[in-house]
Image (tube, rainbow, N blue to C red):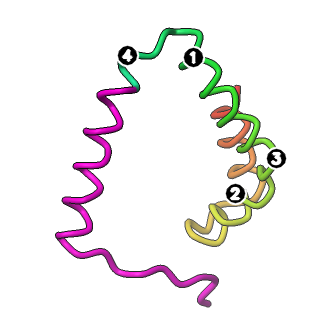
Amino acid sequence: MVFTQVPDASKGDLEKAISAASTAFQSWKKNSFTERAACMKKFVEGLKSRQQEFAKALTLEQGKPLGAAAGELFACIH
């Protein structure tokens, strides 16, 4: 059963992603703990708001029970 489609990435795409991450890290590492914590809290809120959606995707992708996938997300959030 196909539940989604994703594009293939080329070696060039990978190199662009690595370069972008390296560039982003240069500014990220200058942020204070408080600024980093605020970013992480925002990420967690986004994850919480879509927790069921992510759990379903993990179940479809990996074949694990929905409860196990939800448990992984719960652990990640906390």
Give the x, y percent position of residue 36. Answer: 54, 19
Residue 18 sits above or below residue 53 on the image: above
Sequence order check: which comes first, mark 3 or mark 2? 3
What residue would you read off at disc 3? Answer: 49
Q: Which mark is residue 35?
A: 1
Helix, strand or loop at mark 4: loop
Q: Nearer the viewer, residue 5 or 2?
A: 5
Q: Give the structural element (helix, strand or loop) at label 3.
A: helix
Region rendered in magenta = 1-27
Q: Mark 2: which secondary structure?
A: helix
Residue 12 colored in magenta in the image: yes
Local secondary structure at mark 1: helix
The residue that mark 4 highlights is 30
Provide residue 39's location: percent of width, then percent of height: 60, 28
User: Which of the two discs, 4 and 2, labels the residue nearer the N terminus?
Assistant: 4
* Callout in the foreground (4, 2): 4
Q: Earlier in the sequence, mark 3 or mark 1?
A: 1
The one of 74 and 24 positioned closer to us in this rendering: 24
Mark 3 or 1: the one toward you? 1
Q: Marks 4 and 3: CB-CB under 8 Å?
A: no
Amino acid carrying mark 3 in the image: Ser
Task: Please state if 38 lies on the left or on the right of 21 as rendered.
Answer: right
Tell me the residue that label 2 is attached to.
54
